[in-house]
C-alpha cells in the first residue's frame, strides 16, 4: 500500500472546512475527519517534527524555526519506510533546511514565490518513475504569508492596513489550495487506488483575532486547532471523530498500517478507521512555542483539559502572563480569576512536561538565557528571518 502525507502550511481549520471542492471530494471518497485534531506548536518545525517522528517537540528540543539540519539525528517516518522497501519522495515549493529534505529518494523543490504549480506535474512524474510501494510527503505553502496561491493574488504588503485585503488574499489562497489538493489526490487515487492518504495543516493563522496577525504570539485555537482527514482503502466511511487527536498520531497510525511497532507517543487510528475498534485517546493536548526573537520575545506553553485551555506566556525579561479559557465559550474571556482550582490543575499538568515554566505568584527567571538568545538569533539570521 502506498502512503501520502499531504500538508498545507498555515491552513486554518475553519477555512479548510469551507473548501468546497475538497468537501465534495472527501465526502464522496469516504475520508474520515478528525474534528478535535491539534498541532503541537504555532510554527512549522515543531509540528513537522511531530508529524514525521511521532514525538512531541520536547523529545527533540525543537520549539521554533531553528534552521538546523535535524534530519541526521531524527528517526523520521521517511527513513523508517525506506528501510521497509518503500520508495520515498517529497515536494515543497521552497528549499528549506532541516528534516524536510532528509531521507527521501526524490525531493522536488521550487523557488516560485512559495506558490504551487497547478497540477503539480513534477510530483506526478517522480511518482510514476519510482514504482510501488511509495511514501510521499507534500508541503504546500500557498496559504502561508504572503498568501500567493495564484499568480493574480496581490502581495500582502500592498493590501489595506485594516486587514480586509489581508483576509481577502488569504481566502483566495485557500481557494487555490482547494483546487491543488483535489487535483493531486484525485490523480493519486485514480492511478494508484491502493493508497492511504492523510491530509492536515502544520498550524493555522491569526487574521485579527485577539488583535493579532500571522502565526506567532501565543497558542490560540486559530493556530493549533487544525484540519485533519484520513483515508485508507477498505475503511469504514463517514467517520467523524470527536476525540482528541494530535500530530503524533499520524506516525502511530502509519506504523500500525504497515505492521511495525509504533514509534513515538501517539495513538493509532487504524482500528477506528477500519471499523474494528475504538480510538483510544489517552493524553491531554500539550502545546509549545518559542517566539522568533526579532519579532516575538515570548515563550509559550499551553494545555487543554476537557473544555478548559490554559496558556502561559513567558517573556524574555522574566515576567509572565496566564490565561484560562472555557473553549465552549471560545477564547474571549480569561476566567483565570474565577476558576483558581482548574487553573492549578492545568498548571500541574503542564508542570509534568515543563517543570521549569512559571506558575502564578512564583518568581521566575528570564525565559531566554543570553546564550539561547544568541543561538536563536543566529539561526534565524541564517534562514533570512532576521539580520
Image (spheres, rainbow, N blue to C red):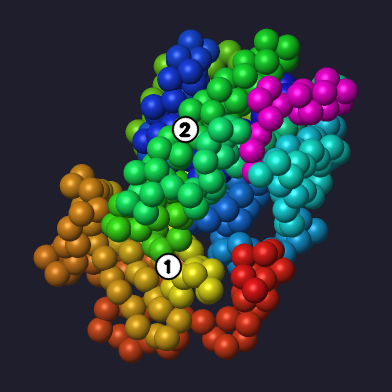
| Residue depicted at 53% across the width and 74% down the height | 293
Q: Position of residue 304 (x, y in %)?
A: 33, 54
- Observer-side mark, 2 or 1, equals 2
| Residue beneath the point at 86% across and 38% down | 105
Residue position marked by numbered label 2 in the rendering: 172
Rate crowding at label 1 as few (under 14), some (14 to 19) or many (20 or more) other CA atoms within 10 Å: many
State the image coordinates of residue 77 (x, y, percent, origin top left): 71, 43
Secondary structure, mark 2, is helix
- Residue 114 lies, in percent from the top left, at 65, 43
**Residue plotted at (67% across, 71% down):** 381
User: What's the distance in space between the residues labelled 2 and 1, CA to CA?
Assistant: 31 Å
Kindly identify the residue that appears in the image at 39 percent across and 27 percent down. 18
Left or right relative to 9: residue 112: right
Q: Is residue 381 left or right of residue 40?
A: right
Sooner in the amino-acid sequence: mark 2 or mark 1:
2
Above or below residue 267? Residue 22 is above
User: Is residue 67 visible in the rendered structure shown here?
Assistant: yes
Q: Quadrant of residue 345?
A: bottom left
Q: Which residues are magenta?
A: 114-130
The kind of secondary structure element at disc 1 is strand
Label disc, if present, on residue 62 of the rendered structure: none
Instruction: Describe residue 358's horizontal placement relative to residue 21 as left or right.
Output: left
Quadrant of the frame with the N terminus: top right
Q: Which residue is under mark 1?
A: 300
Question: From the viewer's perspective, is residue 40 above or below residue 279?
Answer: below
Which image quadrant for residue 319? bottom left
Amino acid at each position: 500500500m502506498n502512503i501520502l502525507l499531504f500538508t498545507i502550511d498555515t491552513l486554518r481549520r475553519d477555512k479548510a472546512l469551507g473548501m468546497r471542492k475538497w468537501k465534495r471530494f472527501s465526502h464522496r471518497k469516504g475520508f474520515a475527519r478528525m474534528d478535535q485534531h491539534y498541532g503541537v506548536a504555532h510554527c512549522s518545525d515543531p509540528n513537522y517534527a511531530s508529524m514525521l517522528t511521532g514525538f512531541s517537540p520536547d523529545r527533540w528540543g525543537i520549539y521554533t524555526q531553528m534552521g538546523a539540519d535535524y534530519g541526521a539525528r531524527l528517526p523520521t517516518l521517511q527513513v523508517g519506510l525506506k528501510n521497509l522497501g518503500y520508495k520515498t519522495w517529497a515536494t515543497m515549493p521552497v528549499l528549506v533546511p532541516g528534516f524536510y529534505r532528509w531521507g527521501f529518494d526524490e525531493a522536488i523543490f521550487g523557488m516560485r514565490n512559495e506558490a504551487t504549480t497547478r497540477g503539480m506535474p513534477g510530483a506526478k512524474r517522480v511518482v510514476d518513475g519510482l514504482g510501488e510501494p511509495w511514501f510521499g510527503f507534500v508541503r504546500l505553502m500557498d496559504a502561508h504569508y504572503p498568501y500567493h496561491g495564484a499568480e493574480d493574488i496581490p502581495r500582502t504588503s500592498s493590501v489595506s492596513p485594516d486587514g480586509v485585503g489581508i483576509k481577502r488574499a488569504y481566502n483566495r489562497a485557500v481557494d487555490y489550495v482547494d483546487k491543488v489538493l483535489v487535483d493531486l489526490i484525485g490523480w493519486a487515487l485514480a492511478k494508484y487506488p491502493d493508497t492511504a492518504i492523510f491530509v492536515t495543516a502544520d498550524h493555522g493563522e491569526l487574521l485579527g483575532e485577539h488583535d493579532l496577525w500571522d502565526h506567532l504570539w501565543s497558542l490560540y485555537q486559530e493556530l493549533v486547532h487544525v484540519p485533519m482527514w484520513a483515508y485508507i482503502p477498505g475503511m469504514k466511511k463517514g467517520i467523524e471523530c470527536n476525540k482528541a487527536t494530535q500530530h503524533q498520531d499520524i506516525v502511530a497510525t502509519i506504523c500500525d498500517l504497515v505492521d511495525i511497532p509504533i514509534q513515538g507517543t501517539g495513538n493509532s487510528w487504524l482500528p477506528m478507521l477500519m471499523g474494528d475498534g475504538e480510538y483510544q485517546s489517552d493524553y491531554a493536548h500539550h502545546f509549545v512555542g518559542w517566539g522568533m526573537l526579532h519579532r516575538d520575545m515570548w515563550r509559550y506553553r499551553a494545555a487543554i483539559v476537557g473544555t478548559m485551555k490554559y496558556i502561559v506566556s513567558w517573556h524574555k525579561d522574566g515576567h509572565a502572563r496566564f490565561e484560562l479559557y472555557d473553549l465552549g465559550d471560545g477564547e474571549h474571556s480569561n476566567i483565570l480569576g474565577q476558576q483558581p482550582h482548574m487553573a492549578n490543575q492545568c498548571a500541574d499538568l503542564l508542570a509534568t512536561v515543563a517543570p521549569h515554566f512559571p506558575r502564578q505568584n512564583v518568581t521566575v527567571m528570564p525565559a531566554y538565557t543570553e546564550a539561547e538568545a544568541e543561538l536563536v538569533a543566529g539561526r534565524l539570521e541564517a534562514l533570512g528571518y532576521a539580520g
